[in-house]
Image: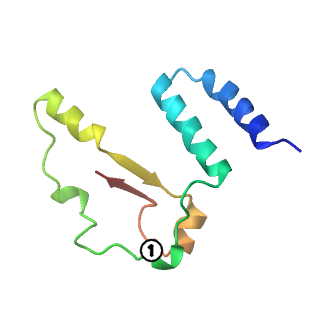
Amino acid sequence: MATDTDKLTQLKSSVAGLSQISENEKNGFINLVARYLSGEAQHVEWSKIQTPTDEVVVPYDTLAPAPEVPAETKKLLDKLVVLKLNGGLGTTMGCTGPKYAFFH
C-alpha cells in the first residue's frame, strides 16, 4: 500500500507535466493535498451548511455588464471561483437548477 509520501511524490510527478497551470498553482495544489493527507486540513461540518437564500444567489440576467477596461475585468476574474457539482451530488443536495455556481 502506498504511503502518503509515495502518493505526494506521484502527484508531484503527474502535476509537473501540466502546462495549463502555473508553478504557483501547481505548488498550491500540492500543498493543499499534503495538508489534507496530514490531517491538518479543517473538516466541513455539513450539518451547518444551509441552502443559499435568494439574496445570495443572483440571476445571471440581473448582473451588471463586464467593465470595458480589460484590467478591471481581470480584477473581477481574479476573484472568481466556480463550483461545479456532478449531477448525482447536486441532486442529492437538493439542487433543481444548474449544478454550478460562481462566487467572487
Q: Taking 103 as reference, is 88 above or below it?
A: below
Mark 1 nearby-residue class (10 Å; few <14, some 14–19, many ≥20): few
Q: Is residue 16 left or right of residue 102?
A: right
Residue at 59% in and 53% down: 40
Give the residue furthest to the left: 68
Quadrant showing the N terminus: top right
What amino acid is at disc 1?
Answer: Ile
Tell me the residue at 41%/77% (across/down): 50
As displayed, is residue 10 above or below residue 3? above
Picture coordinates of residue 62, whole percent (x, y) = 16, 59
Which of 76 and 34 lies nearest the eye of the viewer? 34
Query: Relative to 2, is 15 on the left or the right?
Result: left
Vertical placement of 9 versus 43: above or below? above
Give the quadrant of residue 29.
Answer: top right
Q: Position of residue 13 (x, y in %)?
A: 69, 25
Residue 12, percent from left and from top:
66, 29
Point out residue 57 in the picture as x, y percentages from the top left corner: 28, 66
Q: Residue at x 40, y 49 (%)?
A: 82
Left or right, 45 with reference to 98 = right
> In the depicted view, which residue is nearer to us: 30 or 102?
30
Q: Is residue 59 left or right of residue 28?
A: left
Q: Which quadrant would residue 80 be assigned to in this image?
A: top left
Residue at image point 49% right, 76% down: 94
Q: Which residue carries the number 1 mark?
A: 49
- Foreground residue among 77 and 33: 33
Tell which of 25 and 37 is nearer to you: 37
Residue lying furthest bottom: 47
